[in-house]
Amino acid sequence: MKSVFLTFAIALAAFQFSFSQSKTEQEVLQLSKDKWQWMADKEIEKLDKLFDDKSKFLHMSGTWKKAEELEIIKTGSIWYKKATIHDSAVEVSGNTVIVWNRITLESVVRGNDAKVEFTVTEVYQKQKKDWKMLALSFSSVRDTHQIKK
């Protein structure tokens, strides 16, 4: 009986969460999740379309622009093998959306395996009918870090 009640409570919470988010929030969160997979699969054409021409990327080892980020992904000097998203928060302001994802990133950086906890800040803007990523910033955090909603 307890397991049935617990299952029902979890399902109800997930159902309420999905309806508490706006269509825009859901759309951009899905785009953010897709982006991690495109990065893992080195889908440069999809990323090129997503990243704004003036986008900036802040990593632990430096800051670069769109062309450099795409080249890094294409050549595999950083291979984003798997991003496990533990928690997300979204804020919408007009045609701009900020997404915070607390992730564990499994990657290969210049030939070395890495598994690091990050909070990643992503800024998206609706341009005509497409969302464009303006910025992506990695912040190293403890695994106990929680995103305030």
Image (tube, rainbow, N blue to C red):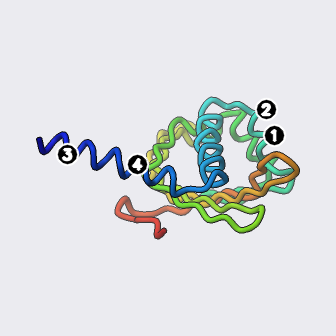
Q: Which residue is located at x 35 percent, y 48 percent?
A: 12
User: What is the C-alpha distance between the residues marked 4 and 1?
Assistant: 31 Å
Residue type at mark 4: give it: Ala
Q: Is residue 1 above or below residue 101?
A: above
Give the residue at x 47% y 47%.
Answer: 85
Q: Amino acid at mark 2?
A: Glu
Q: What residue is pinned by disc 2?
A: 45
Q: Nearer the viewer, mark 4 or mark 1?
A: 4
Q: Amino acid at mark 1?
A: Lys
The residue indicated by pointer 1 is: 49
Q: Are marks 2 and 1 in contact (CB under 8 Å)?
A: yes
Which of these two is toward me, 43 or 24?
A: 24
Q: Secondary structure at mark 1?
A: helix
Q: Position of residue 42 (x, y in %)?
A: 67, 31
Label 1 CA crowd tier, 10 Å (few <14, some 14–19, many 20+): few
User: Of callouts 4 and 2, which one flags the residue occurring earlier in the amino acid sequence?
Assistant: 4
Which circle's residue, 2 or 3, is located before the other in the chain? 3
Q: Which residue is labeled 3 in the image?
A: 5
Instruction: Let me know if residue 62 appears in the view.
Output: no
